[in-house]
Amino acid sequence: MRVPLIVGNWKMHTTIGEARQLVNEMRLGLDKIEGVEKVICPPFVSLAVVKELIKGSSIKLGAQNLYFAEKGAYTGEVSPLMLADLCEFVIIGHSERRQYFGETDSIVNNKLRAAFKVGLKTILCVGERLEENEAGKTKEVVTGQLKSSLAGLDYPQDLVLAYEPIWAIGTGRAATGSKANETVSLIRQQFAESYGKENAREVRILYGGSVTTDNIVEFVEQSEIDGALVGGASLRTDQFVGIVKQTSEIK
Ligand code: PEP
């Protein structure tokens, strides 16, 4: 039984004051909804404040990135140990990290390893570029990313996967539910090859890319899709609460 999951990635949005206001707005609405796990991922600087604000609530907290070293002379970076004190989840390998900060599958692999070591639950993102999609290379790209990112890692119990076609992120051009389901199914098959069918049946796989209240149902009604990773719409209370609510009605 896979518990549906909706994750809000606030990206580089919200000052501490704005984060406080947003979480206060969302909390009541989200707490009324049962049967869906809800995670919000504010910027690093707001994690401590948000952690206090969600005490006693059903909302869980995640970070958007980490560096793989435990500590040391890595100016500006945030270590897994620092995050383990603050939050439960961390997003790893988001396409914006890959695109703007040169994150390779090998770096992603190191980050996953480091996150598991301190007990963080990870949300590993994979997804193809538009030209790869148009060239019919989606399967090759996403299964390749998955294999290399997980290379040499024992079965990662606390892993969530997110299929995020890059052309759908922040563009307003979401994939169709059926196409996303097809790719998520391939990801599950690849996971089964590495970790066995039983574990593959249990791993949660999200869809991400321009999810809103207008299209969430199309994704969560699919058999293989267990929820969504939501960017832009997670910054609006009506949208994020609506997405979680609709998910709870379907799953
Ligand atoms: C994301 O940031 O992971 C994302 C899917 O963004 P958006 O929902 O804005 O497309």
Image (tube, rainbow, N blue to C red):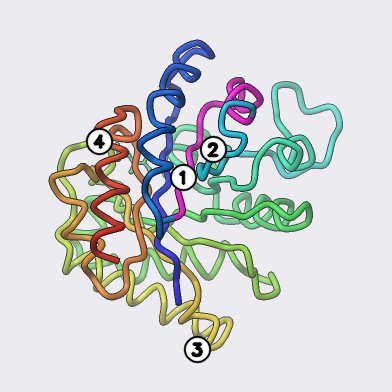
Q: Secondary structure at mark 3?
A: helix
Magenta part of the chain: 37-51
Q: Earlier in the sequence, mark 1 or mark 3?
A: 1
Q: Nearer the viewer, mark 1 or mark 4?
A: 4
At x 23% / y 50%, what residue is drawn? Answer: 130
Identify the amino acid type marked 2. Gln
Pick the residue in front: 209 or 76.
209
Q: Nearer the viewer, mark 2 or mark 1?
A: 2
Q: Which residue is mark 4?
A: 239
The answer to whether 184 appears left or right of 135 in the picture is: right
The answer to whether 23 appears left or right of 105 in the picture is: left
What label sits on residue 197 in the rendered view? 3
Q: Is mark 1 within 8 Å of ligand 1?
A: yes
Image coords of residue 115 (percent x, y): 70, 51
Please state, as top left, top right, bottom left or bottom right, where the C terminus lies in the image. Answer: bottom left
Q: What's the distance in space between the residues labelled 4 and 2, CA to CA? A: 20 Å
Identify the amino acid type marked 3. Lys
Please state, as top left, top right, bottom left or bottom right, where the N terminus lies in the image. Answer: bottom left
Q: Are marks 1 and 3 in contact (CB under 8 Å)?
A: no
What label sits on residue 94 in the rendered view? 1
Q: Does residue 49 belong to the magenta stretch? A: yes
Q: Earlier in the sequence, mark 3 or mark 4?
A: 3
Q: Are marks 2 and 1 in contact (CB under 8 Å)?
A: yes
Q: Which residue is mark 2?
A: 64
Res 54 quadrant in image: top right
Q: What's the distance in space between the residues labelled 1 and 4, CA to CA? A: 22 Å
Q: Secondary structure at mark 2?
A: loop
